Image: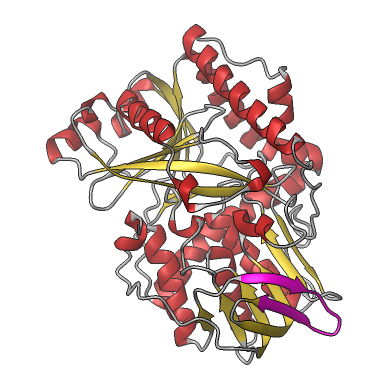
């Protein structure tokens, strides 16, 4: 069933034709989501003569690009403080600024190309719901200030937060003005249409079954023929483990969403939230909220189980217990929504690298380029990835070479059953830590095994 974002994308969803036998291309992009489309976009911008073909197993926007929580997050999966520890304060600051700039770039492309992605730049409110989460507000601000990234970031007390949005049990928030929200379906489908207008071929319903690296050329083997190219770009995110030899590259973790029916004006008057900020708390198990242009509220979060062998399947997109819990949490945030119906439920996998840091790289010898591992924070970062990969493919270098994601090769995940045991242990342990913090009002210590394993 088509989810809300694609159904309201203002685009014709009739599937494109599949690949028609063997063909040659300069660049074959595997994956019709944000990473693949942005890479194709900037490849053609840097060299309009390039023959680029985008190969999608389902339809454009089928994956995370068409299912996400609408955030444009100004960061990556690793916190600025942890980036400073792993690399240097200067590189950490440069990374955050590059992703912040990517939001500006996305807005500029939408303006130039006439893509109505319903971009709203209200920033992000990271809310302390209960005493246990208050220290995280101050720690988050202190971290940004130490790195010279604090301009415009403000700490709000409970009253200042309530003037923006009224959330139950909220004691304050950190407002980051650099974030934004958008309509995922309109952005991903709009990019695809503009690429086709520029001469990029997009084929759908074409599943890649093997990748044969060069030299002299890469062969992308599909169920409808072989594309031989100078370069192949792997942009499949959580579906990467389905390719031969890639089962341990990233861990597919499911994130699920509930979306309400349109909320009436009287209820909006009580809630506020006129700035369309993205909202989250500080739970280890993650929550993320946004509001739509047509007056709905989206609530997303983790909790659905990891599946043995890094399995990804349509049946996993729904998990009744997790969806019911998300709906319950939504009314916990906003008691005024108690009588509002949840109209849509969906979900999908996101890709977790072993060290939580995305990787953008190109091997000119084999002709294979990859970008993946966004940990659920990829909408803005995919634009940066597309620019980096296009630079590396066309010129062999990039102005972003110092960023820790560029050329990065994370450790592979453990083989099964260790991978399953570790993932399920972490999921259960982090949920218990959240429950204990909410019950006692005391923040997690940061010293448990689970916390040390996910420190990022």
Quadrant for the C terminus in the image: top right
Q: At 70% across and 77% down in the image, what residue appears?
A: 220
**Segment colored magenta:** 208-221
Magenta span has 215?
Answer: yes
Q: How many numbered marks appear?
A: 0
Q: At 39% across and 28% down in the image, what residue appears?
A: 325
Q: Nearer the viewer, residue 363 or 249?
A: 249
Magenta span has 17?
Answer: no
User: Would residue 418 be seen by someone viewing this image from the given angle?
Assistant: yes
User: Would residue 178 be seen by someone viewing this image from the given angle?
Assistant: no
Q: On the rendered structure, is 314 left or right of 341? A: right
Most common SS among magenta residues: strand
Q: Nearer the viewer, residue 400 or 33?
A: 33
Q: Position of residue 309 (x, y in %)?
A: 68, 45
Q: At 53% across and 26% down in the image, what residue appears?
A: 137
Q: Position of residue 338 (x, y in %)?
A: 22, 27
Q: Position of residue 147 (x, y in %)?
A: 68, 39
């Amino acid at each position: 069933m088509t989810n809300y974002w694609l159904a309201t994308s203002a685009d014709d969803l009739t599937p494109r034709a599949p690949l028609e036998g063997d063909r040659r291309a300069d660049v074959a992009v595997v994956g019709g989501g944000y990473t693949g489309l942005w890479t194709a976009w900037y490849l053609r911008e840097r060299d309009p003569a390039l023959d680029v073909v985008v190969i999608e197993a389902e339809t454009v926007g089928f994956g995370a690009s068409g299912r996400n929580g609408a955030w444009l997050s100004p960061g990556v999966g690793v916190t600025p403080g942890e980036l400073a520890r792993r690399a240097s304060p200067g590189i950490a600051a440069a990374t955050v600024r590059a992703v912040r700039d990517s939001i500006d770039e996305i807005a500029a492309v939408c303006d130039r190309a006439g893509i109505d992605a319903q971009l709203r730049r209200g920033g992000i409110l990271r809310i302390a719901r209960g005493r246990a989460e208050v220290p995280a507000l101050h720690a988050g601000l202190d971290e940004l200030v130490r790195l010279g990234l604090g301009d415009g970031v403000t700490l709000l007390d409970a009253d200042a937060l309530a003037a923006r949005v009224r959330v139950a049990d909220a004691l304050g928030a950190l407002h980051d003005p650099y974030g934004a929200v958008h309509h995922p379906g309109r952005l991903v489908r709009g990019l695809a249409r503009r690429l086709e207008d520029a001469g990029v071929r997009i084929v759908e319903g074409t599943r890649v079954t093997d990748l044969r690296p060069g030299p002299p050329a890469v062969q992308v083997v599909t169920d409808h023929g072989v594309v031989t190219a100078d370069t192949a770009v792997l942009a499949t995110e959580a579906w990467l483990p389905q390719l031969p030899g890639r089962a341990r590259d990233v861990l597919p973790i499911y994130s699920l969403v509930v979306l309400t029916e349109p909320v009436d004006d009287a209820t909006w008057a009580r809630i506020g939230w006129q700035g369309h900020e993205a909202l989250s708390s500080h739970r280890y198990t993650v929550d993320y909220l946004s509001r739509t242009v047509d007056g709905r509220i989206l609530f997303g979060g983790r909790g659905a189980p990891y599946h043995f062998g890094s399995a990804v399947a349509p049946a996993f997109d729904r998990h009744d217990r997790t969806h019911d819990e998300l709906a319950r949490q939504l009314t916990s945030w906003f008691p005024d929504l108690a009588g509002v119906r949840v109209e849509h439920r969906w979900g999908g996998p996101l890709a977790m690298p072993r060290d939580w840091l995305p990787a953008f790289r190109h091997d000119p010898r084999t002709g294979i380029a990859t970008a993946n591992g966004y940990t659920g924070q990829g909408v803005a970062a995919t634009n940066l990835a597309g620019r980096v990969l296009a630079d590396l493919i066309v010129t062999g270098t990039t102005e972003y070479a110092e960023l820790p994601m560029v050329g990065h090769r994370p450790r592979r995940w453990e083989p099964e059953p260790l991978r399953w045991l570790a993932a399920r242990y972490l999921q259960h342990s982090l949920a218990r830590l959240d429950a204990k913090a909410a019950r006692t009002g005391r923040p997690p210590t940061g010293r448990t095994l689970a916390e040390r394993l996910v420190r990022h």
